[in-house]
Structures are given as C-alpha cells and as structure tokens.
Amino acid sequence: MAKTSEYYKKNPKAAAKRRKQQAKYNKTTKGLAIRVNANKLNRKLGTYGNRDGKDSCHAKGSTTKGKTCPAKVNRKSRTKKKA
C-alpha cells in the first residue's frame, strides 16, 4: 500500500480535509479537464466501469491517447524506497 494511503487511514481529520480540497479542485477548469479526459480514455479503451482492475495510462504528453495498465501499478507511489 502507498504511503499516502496509509497516512490518510491513520489521520481521519487530514483525510476529511483532503477530500474537501479535492472536491473543490475537481470543479475547477483544470481539475474537471483532467477527470473528463481520464474518463474519456477509459471509455475508449473499454475499461470504464467494468471492474476489470485496469486503468488508463496516458501516453506522455497526451490527454487523449494511452493504454491500459493495472490500477495497482498506476495508483501506487512511484518513489523508490531508500535503503
């Protein structure tokens, strides 16, 4: 599990604050565009709402092209752990 997810599970006040902030952001022009394009690509790839465990992974620099990838890989933290 990602560190962010663990943090918000342990800190319900912070999680509520984040959800409130995200709700506002998702209504802004930029936030709405990101959400709309992600849903559009999911539909184009045939993975929207079918619970197949896949997400759309956007091609670099594109909002309309991409491929499917496992949601687990797409949503987890990409930072490397320090030894």
Image (spheres, rainbow, N blue to C red):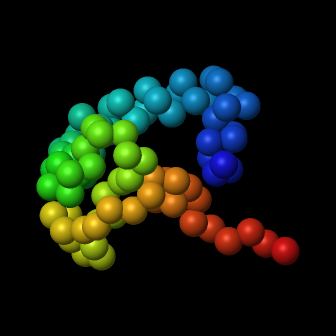
> Is any atom of residue 30 visible in this view?
no
8 vs 65: above or below: above
Residue 19 is left or right of residue 81, and the answer is: left
Residue farthest to the right, as pictured:
83
Q: Quadrant of the C terminus?
A: bottom right
The residue at 63%/23% (across/down) is 13
Comparing 27 with 51, the one in front is 51
- Looking at the rendering, which quadrant does residue 15 occupy? top right
Please indicate, yes or no, whether residue 64 appears anywhere in the rendered image. yes
Q: Residue at x 27, y 49 (%)?
A: 47
Q: Position of residue 2 (x, y in %)?
A: 64, 51
Q: Nearer the viewer, residue 66 or 77?
A: 66
> Horizontally, is 8 left or right of 30 in the view?
right
Residue visible at 65% across and 24% down in the picture: 12
Percent across and percent down for residue 59 are 28, 73
* Residue 80 left/right relative to 33: right
Task: Indicate the position of residue 31 as horizontal and vertical percent values.
Answer: 27, 45
Which residue is pictured at 79% across the width and 72% down the height? 82
Rendered location of residue 33, percent (x, y): 19, 49
Front-lying residue, 44 or 24: 44
Locate residue 78 relative to residue 48 in the image: left or right: right
